[in-house]
Amino acid sequence: MAVCARLCGVGQSRRCRRRQRQQRGDPDSNPGLELDDDDDEEENEGVMDERIVIKRQDASKASGKAVVSTAPVTSASSTSAILNGLSNRNPEHKGSPRLLDLPPELLVEIFSSLPGTALPNLSLVCKKFRQIINTDTIWRRRCIEEFGMCEDLRKLEVEGLPSRELYVKLLYPYRHILGLWQPDIGPYGGLLNVVVDGLFIIGWMYLPPHDPRVNDPMRRRPLFRIHMWESSKATVECMYGYKGPHKGDIQTVKKDEFSTKCNQTDHHRMPGGRQEEFRTWLEEEWGRTLEDIFHEHMQELILMKFIYTCQYDNCLTYHRIYLPPHHPGDVMKPGLFKGTYGSHGLEIVMLSFHVNRAKGTKLTGDPNVPAGQLTLDIDLSRTIQLPDIDKQRSIDELSRLVMEVHEQVQREQQLAQREDADIGNENSRAPLASANIPLMNGSQDVEEDDHVENEMEQPLHEEAAAHHQESQPFVLPGGVMARNEVYPRTYRMCFYGTGLIAGHGFTSPERTPGIFILFDDDCFGFIWLELKSFSLYSRVKDSLQYAEAPSAEAFEEMLKNMQSWTS
């Protein structure tokens, strides 16, 4: 109330809802994203939970009293700065400018620069502010700057739907589901991108191209959409099935997790029953008919996936994922890649870099190695120089090079384990002796150890990359199976690494040695020595929105959680 009077310079507002609710003793007096017109008070969605306390000293310092008022916090610190700056204006001084003295068009420009979550606070100040904030120009700009909507807003306004309604009832309430997600479909996983698409919020499921065309663009299919075409509130529709959009529901389970539910699963059924549904699914998923697949084991895998995935009927739970961050010393840009996995077809892998290691994490998986598992673990500190083109054709020569590095890694790991065991035994035998070590010496030892560790953590592959940027000839060894007969014939660098293999149902998982081959910025390969198999990976070049990690720590935490989602 006091803030209202001071901002406006016209005394206490008679229609100040904050004061009215406090007088009524209304416990739910926290205004969220709500705006009222001149005569009607309109309750809108999206309640803000945070508050800010603004303290003001009375004009007479002799009283020694402080007036305190509460208001919902806005998402920008600039809003608080503006309010504090305005509140320092003393309306009793005639030469002091007041916010109400500014022309309406200038106030519209000022309010348009504030985040949408800050505007309801200003609407509580006075009647003039409330009238100006109802201007659709302000909300149109908020929709454009915060959610990327452009020309589509004009279409909505012609249809009689103001931009304010669109922001308050659609964009703001569902802002938490925008971004990149992985569905919980057992071992198969997936990739979902929820974006503002035209006049809708749409969840696009991204699918790899048909096997084995790894260089083809990704396919996508809408799973759900949210809009405001038919009513004054947001409508959720399921897009799964063959009969068009139908009723659905979305629930936010917890932070970074939400679920979808179809309320009319009969729309997913086809007149010809499961057989017709399977034939249609097979053509969409694999681009072929069952008669075209001669391998019996592959037929079993395809039928198993159809039965498993169809039982969900688009009632799924999604977990938020992020794109990997890029570091200056990376040998290539991280990101998402499509890779060949034998009879399982193409799968999506996330390649990320961690100092001297590169990790390939599955976003889509199979019954042997499910989604969320670390399919590739590359040691960037151990480069491998391939021989000339004639010797590359020999699998024995390639195996010899890789196994030399593999055995060295095993010896180093065993030595490190013995040293750790010896240190543990010494500490258990003489706990008192270690306590008598002078503090200064201990501090120096720790500092020296930290210095050594920091030196070891420096990207060792940067020096190797400087000497191996020129392309060199490459050919697959004889006897190595490849889904793609067409593959790059030159490479930049090779590194030692391990790949994860397992039996059906992820039984007896183990890491097997192999070689990581960097062809160019958008393509790499991996030779699985034990399987005598070659996987080719090509970059996903689609623009995935709202997918950047807020911090490196958030991305690392996500990688740790991914395995538990599909375990």
Image (spheres, rainbow, N blue to C red):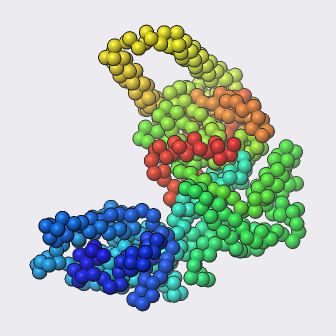
Residue shown at 72%/62% (left/top)? 314
The quadrant in which residue 318 appears is bottom right
Left or right of 555 in this view: 212? right
Left or right of 464 in this view: 367? right
Q: Spot the residue most to the bottom.
A: 39
At which x and y percent is residue 77?
33, 61
Residue shown at 58%/76% (left/top)? 234
Residue shown at 29%/79% (left/top)? 107
Residue 218 appears in the rendering: no
| The N terminus sits in image quarter | bottom left
Left or right of 556 in this view: 329? left
At which x and y percent is residue 199?
55, 75
The quadrant in which residue 528 appears is top right
Residue 551's place in the image compared with 359, above or below, is below
At which x and y percent is residue 272?
88, 68
Residue 107's place in the image compared with 374, above or below, is below
Residue shown at 41%/71% (left/top)? 116
Residue 235's place in the image compared with 505, above or below, is below
